[in-house]
């Protein structure tokens, strides 16, 4: 599966143009997805030096992207005058999602188990809900 991931506010706290602290479990989750042979594309508004800094920040934490701001590593935007920054991905992970960014554990389970956010949340709610105890007269 090809997964496009935003950087600011998704992998690291949004401190643009600086790099914020890592969002808990972001790089660990991305490394697990890479090990499972998913193609991870860094999809960011960052360009030039700011983009290079973000890529290096991730690399130091063990995250090597399949591609950065393009569909595949060999893509040359200079050869295509109609180049679009729109990435072709199966899933987009971004803090600007409707409803916000789920925690990275939930994101992993959604991708790894092939479940929707609603399914994962329903399972989580079911684990925490206690069944009401029957009264002695209801036996």
Image (cartoon, helix red, strand yellow):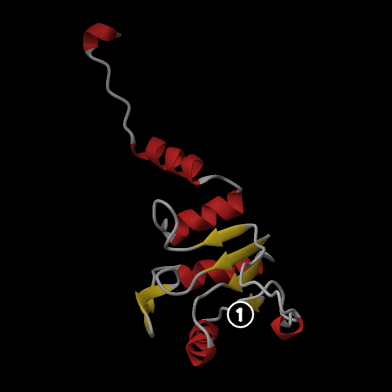
| Quarter placement of the N terminus | bottom right
| Residue denoted by label 1 | 64
Residue, x 23% and y 14% (percent of image)?
135
**Where's residue 48, x and y in %?**
53, 90
In the image, 134 versus 60, the foreground residue is: 60
Q: Residues within 10 Å of mark 1 (few under 14, many from 20)?
A: some
- Residue furthest to the front in view is 81
In the image, 26 versus 133, the foreground residue is: 26
**Looking at the picture, does residue 36 appear above or below residue 106?**
below
| Quarter placement of the C terminus | top left
**Where's residue 26, x and y in %?**
46, 69
Residue, x 61% and y 80% (percent of image)?
64
- Residue furthest to the left in view is 136
**Looking at the picture, does residue 92 appear above or below residue 14?**
above
Q: Is residue 84 left or right of residue 103?
A: right
Q: Is residue 108 left or right of residue 12?
A: right
Assign a secondary structure to mark 1: loop
**Where's residue 42, x and y in %?**
57, 74
């Amino acid at each position: 599966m090809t997964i496009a991931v935003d950087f600011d506010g998704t992998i690291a706290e949004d401190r643009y143009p600086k790099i914020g602290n890592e969002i808990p479990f972001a790089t660990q989750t991305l490394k697990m997805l890479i090990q499972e042979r998913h193609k991870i594309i860094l999809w960011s508004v960052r360009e030039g030096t700011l983009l290079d800094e973000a890529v290096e920040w991730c690399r130091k934490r063990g995250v090597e992207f399949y591609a950065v701001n393009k569909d595949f590593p060999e893509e040359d935007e200079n050869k295509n005058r109609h180049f679009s920054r729109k990435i072709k991905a199966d899933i987009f992970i971004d803090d600007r999602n409707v409803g916000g960014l789920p925690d990275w554990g939930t994101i992993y389970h959604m991708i790894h188990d092939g479940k929707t956010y609603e399914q994962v949340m329903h399972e989580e709610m079911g684990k925490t809900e206690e069944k009401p105890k029957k009264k002695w007269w209801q036996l």
